[in-house]
Amino acid sequence: MIARTTFPAFLLSMTAFASPAQQADPAAIETVIRDQLADFTEDDWVGAFEHASPNIRRIFGSAENFGAMVRNGYPMVWRPSEARFGKLSERTGRALQRVIVFDDAGVPHALEYEMIQVDGAWKINGVRFLQASTGA
């Protein structure tokens, strides 16, 4: 069982720009997440920060602050060896994408990405760890 603290809970609760998942394009959402993961592996903090919602951008203030949080708190996201995409769902008007990332030791970590639309583009509005038993 994966025991992790959640990405700050208030990040996941911010849904000012949320769009229902039934309007969500799974391929577009997956592309945004994959692009951010690729940015992380290249230490492209500016690129990774561009995929964050306005709320996340306000909280961290800069790409450097955002990068420090990811590097120090979420190494499996900073340097995943693999990412597998699971179910895209809607809950209370939010698009939620399940993703399993594998760290450099091959250990899986179940995550749920909250996605919102901002000016027609999908942005990441928060990430939280799931219990391994919830599956993808």
Image (cartoon, helix red, strand yellow):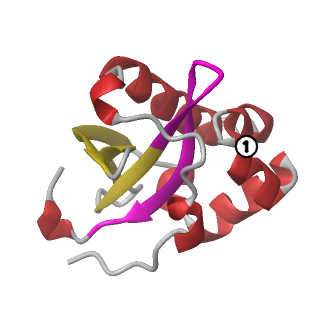
Instruction: Tell me the kind of residue under disc 1.
Output: Pro
Question: Does any portion of residue 8 appear in the rendered image?
Answer: no
Main structural element of the magenta stretch: helix, strand or loop? Answer: strand
Q: Which residue is mark 1?
A: 54
84 relative to 30 in the view: left or right = left
Q: Residue at x 35, y 57 (%)?
A: 111
Q: Could you say where residue 48 lies in the image, as x and y percent from the top left?
A: 68, 37
51 relative to 117 in the view: left or right = right
- Give the magenta part as a residue range: 115-130
Q: Could you say where residue 49 lies in the image, as x and y percent from the top left?
A: 73, 40
Instruction: Decide: is 130 above or below 29.
Output: below
Badge 1, how many Cα within 10 Å: few under 14, some, many 20+?
Answer: some
Q: Is residue 34 magenta?
A: no
Q: Residue at x 66, y 69 (%)?
A: 72
37 relative to 48 in the view: left or right = left
Please name whichever residue, 44 or 26, is drawn nearer the observer in this view of the structure.
26
Query: Dot 1 lies on which element?
Result: helix
Total marks placed: 1
In the rendered image, the quadrant that contains the N terminus is bottom left
Splitting the image into 4 quarters, where does residue 119 fall?
top right
Please name whichever residue, 88 or 36, is drawn nearer the observer in this view of the structure.
88
Question: Does any portion of residue 78 appear in the rendered image?
Answer: yes
Q: Residue at x 32, y 81 (%)?
A: 3
Instruction: Decide: is 79 above or below 95.
Output: below
Q: Could you say where residue 92 lies in the image, as x and y percent from the top left?
A: 34, 52
Instruction: Decide: is 27 above or below 94.
Output: above
Q: Could you say where residue 86 lies in the image, as x and y percent from the top left?
A: 21, 40
Please name whichever residue, 119 or 66, is drawn nearer the observer in this view of the structure.
119
Q: Residue at x 27, y 37 (%)?
A: 85
